Image (cartoon, rainbow, N blue to C red):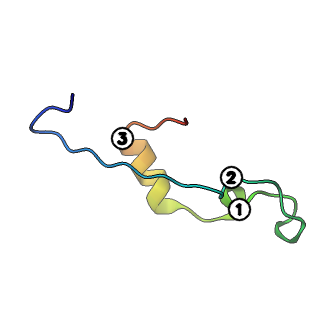
Amino acid sequence: AVPSRGRLFITVLCGGADRPVAELGGLTPFEAAATPHLDDLARRGSSAAL
């Protein structure tokens, strides 16, 4: 259960960690992307992969 004073924020990112793309230098879309906001959310919260 989430404490009453806490907040719950769920983000589902689908497809970005797909297969490497030749046009991206063999990187996946997430590896090639600049993700400062997602990085900040992950740093300040809890993250998991399902």
Q: Quadrant of the N terminus?
A: top left
Q: Quadrant of the C terminus?
A: top right
33 vs 47: above or below: below
- Label 3 packing within 10 angstroms: few (<14), some (14-19), many (20+): few
Kindly identify the residue that appears in the image at 20 percent across and 33 percent down. 2
Displayed quadrant of residue 14: bottom right
The residue type indicated by label 2 comes to: Ala
Foreground of the two, 45 or 48: 48
In the rendered structure, find residue 45 and report the number of the disc placed on it: 3
Mark 1 to mark 2 CA distance (whole Å): 6 Å
Q: Are the two marked residues, 1 and 2, in contact with CB atoms closer than 8 angstroms?
A: yes
Q: Which residue is mark 2?
A: 17
User: In x, y percent, where is residue 26?
Assistant: 87, 59
Displayed quadrant of residue 35: bottom right
Mark 3 to mark 1 CA distance (whole Å): 23 Å
In the rendered structure, find residue 18 and report the number of the disc placed on it: none
Q: Are the two marked residues, 2 and 3, in contact with CB atoms closer than 8 angstroms?
A: no
Mark 2 to mark 3 CA distance (whole Å): 20 Å
Foreground of the two, 37 or 16: 16
Kindly identify the residue that appears in the image at 31 percent across and 49 percent down. 9
**Nearer the viewer's eye, disc 3 or disc 1?**
1
Q: In the rendered structure, which disc, 2 or 3, sits on the residue that comes first in sequence?
A: 2
The residue type indicated by label 1 comes to: Pro
Label 2, secondary structure: give it.
loop
The residue lying furthest to the right in this view is 22
- Label 1 packing within 10 angstroms: few (<14), some (14-19), many (20+): some
User: In x, y percent, where is residue 45?
Assistant: 36, 41
The residue type indicated by label 3 comes to: Gly
Q: Which residue is mark 1?
A: 29
